[in-house]
Image: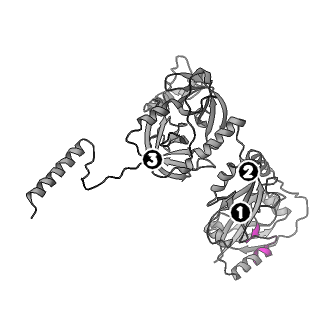
Amino acid sequence: MISDTLLRAARRMVLAGATAFAVGIVAVPSFVTPTIASDGPPSVADLAERLLGAVVNISTSQTVKGTEGPGAVPMPQLPEGSPFQDFFDDFFKNRGGDKGGAAQKVQSLGSGFVVDAEQGIVVTNNHVIADADDIEVNFSDGVTLKATLVGTDTKTDVAVLKVDPKGHKLTAVKFGDSTKMRVGDWVMAIGNPFGLGGTVTVGIVSARNRDINSGPYDDFIQTDAAINRGNSGGPLFNAAGEVINTAIISPSGGSIGIGFSIPSQLAAGVVDQLRQYGETRRGWLGVRIQPVTADIAESLGMATAKGALVAGVIKGGPVDNGTVQAGDVIIKFDGKDIHEMRDLPRVVAESPVGKAVDVVIVRKGIEQTVKVTLGRLEDGEKLASGENGSTDQGNSDKATPPVSTASVLGMTVGELNDQTRQKFGIAADVSGVVVTDVTKDSPAAERGIQPGEVITEIAQESVGTPKDVMDRIGALKQQGRKNALLMLASKTGELRFVTIRMD
């Protein structure tokens, strides 16, 4: 039987819990010790007060065509993401406001932060200031300064601005080490949501290394700190008040508990290059790559699927001397492990131009280390575009011998000669065996192989005739292989690898 003392104690606990619930707190029994993270301060007021002066609002204006006709009323310029934006869009655009006419000034708002008080350097997003005619930086105390553009990088969406440091006493913040941030660490976002200015929100690091397909160097940190339109370009701080992320974005434009930001490790390097050169100077390896799937790993004799598979080498690039070859798998670059394909472009881009680095590759099942001197990505992009744009369809006046063909793995393959080059528009410098037809629902069709593609290698051995193709497939089957690794060239010579089932 329960004693009266115990019943009275239980009643007191229930009443205490109900009272706590009513005022918005949680009642914790005395025998339960709550666990509070040591990095979670009871108040962030001191930290926010120290940082607010360094975070700025970015205001831009751009001249665009406006409404037409006499007496036309221009559409009001609302802060980005305003709750009334949809209403005014519908009202004015339905009245013909999108048909062009007299030029008007359109304004947009974003966020940024000062990283150098002596030089007046401000960091923001590229999309915040893109195509702007005028840029103004608004400080928390109401002072506004004109800004000039130092440089931008579209690949990371980072822009660097400069204001006159004599026009206002500036407060700067410094970049921290984003690599030390752990899931669960406290973070603070300060920005300009909906044009309200100086808004502070707090959350935690929800995840790391997010790839949201926004660019070639995606390595976002995810946070649940409230982020809305207008926060773009604003900083995310750690508990020490250091910028560990920048270029805050939200997938919906409004706070849904998921926001992403660029790690300071990546952003700081871009900012330094823009300040020094007015442009980026990224390292370049000069290879085309693709993921290493389980099938490709098995075909290459690798125990696990990891690294980046080299699908081609850019002519005139840093490794055009045979140091790295098509079919190699890069598993380590300059001491950094390459776990998956997307890791390689980022670590290469972060490396200095002209640096000699060790690259660990797997070639025909054997791991080896090669030394590579990096080129400059911006120069390499010009080479790559020129290489892709050059096509020679051959001379159709030459005699064309009879075409011998073979059928294998759902493909019909034939000799690559003047006739087939002209038929499929294949460049003169592409060699191998041409795919002339692909059977529907065949293993080749499943891998997306198209007529006009050229088989250059099978299991890392060159093929030049349909008979070579048949012999290589037969040899692989005798070895007990389940998949055949094919290196295919496009009409212009771009290479890719595919694996095809042989059962």
Q: The disc labelled 1 sits on which kind of residue?
A: Val
Regarding residue 410, the answer to whether it shows in the image is no
**Foreground residue among 268 and 404:** 268
Instruction: Provide the secondary structure element on which disc 2 rests.
Output: strand
Tell me, for residue 204, which label it has, or none.
Answer: 3
Regarding residue 226, the answer to whether it shows in the image is yes
What segment is highlighted magenta in the picture? 456-470
Q: The disc labelled 3 sits on which kind of residue?
A: Ile
The percent position of residue 372, horizontal first and vertical second, equals: 77, 56
Instruction: Provide the secondary structure element on which disc 1 rests.
Output: strand
- Residue visible at 58% across and 50% down? 219
- CA gap between label 1 and label 2 equals 16 Å
**Foreground residue among 417 and 318:** 318
The percent position of residue 394, horizontal first and vertical second, equals: 86, 57
Which residue sits furthest bottom?
478
- Residue visible at 52% across and 45% down? 260
Q: The disc labelled 2 sits on which kind of residue?
A: Trp
Residue that label 1 marks: 360
Q: Earlier in the sequence, mark 2 or mark 3?
A: 3
